[in-house]
Image (cartoon, helix red, strand yellow):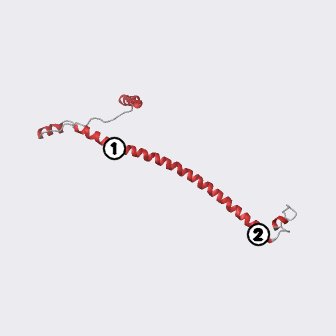
Amino acid sequence: MPSHLRHPSIPGSQATSGQSPVLLARINEKKIELENLQQLRDLSAGLATQMETLEEKLTTLADGTEAVAAVLSNWHNVLRAIHMASQKIPKPKSNADEQQQTDKEVPLPQTLVRVPTNQAAAVTQRAADGVND
């Protein structure tokens, strides 16, 4: 029969006087092991929290990457529209026309702004407030 079963510890009666040094050493080892396991548990909980935070950040990063990809995929269309609007600008045909053109205001391309209809009322109101100020 093992020694730890033969001598049950009864509080108060045989606290330290009747226990063998081997048993005390084993108890101390177990206490140290318990402390280490508690530290491991705490560190694991911290690591789990950090991993959850990392997951949230990676999700945000993935969403941002998709948004950037959508914007970049539209640049070709934007540049093409600007080029088409620039084609509508009349070009001077001679030096005399150039002189008159520089004296006058230089024509600009067509305005290429799209305002979503759900924001149109707010934009119109802001523009009216700006004129009234």
Q: Residue furthest right?
A: 13
Within-10-Å neighbours for mark 2: few <14, some 14–19, many 20+ = few
Q: Is residue 80 above or below residue 16?
A: above
* Residue 21 located left or right of residue 106: right
Q: Quadrant of the C terminus?
A: top left
Q: Position of residue 81 (x, y in %)?
A: 29, 39
Q: Quadrant of the N terminus?
A: bottom right
Quadrant of residue 128 within the rendered picture: top left
Q: Which residue is mark 2?
A: 25
Within-10-Å neighbours for mark 1: few <14, some 14–19, many 20+ = few
Label 2 amino acid?
A: Ala
Query: Secondary structure beneath disc 1?
Result: helix
Q: Nearer the viewer, residue 106 or 23?
A: 23
Residue 75 — which label?
1
Q: Position of residue 24 (x, y in %)?
A: 78, 68
Q: Residue at x 41, y 31 (%)?
A: 119
* Residue 43 located left or right of residue 4: left
Q: Residue at x 13, y 37 (%)?
A: 97
Label 1 amino acid?
A: Trp
Q: Is residue 18 above or below residue 123?
A: below
Q: Residue furthest front?
A: 1
Q: Residue at x 61, y 55 (%)?
A: 46
Q: Earlier in the sequence, mark 2 or mark 1?
A: 2
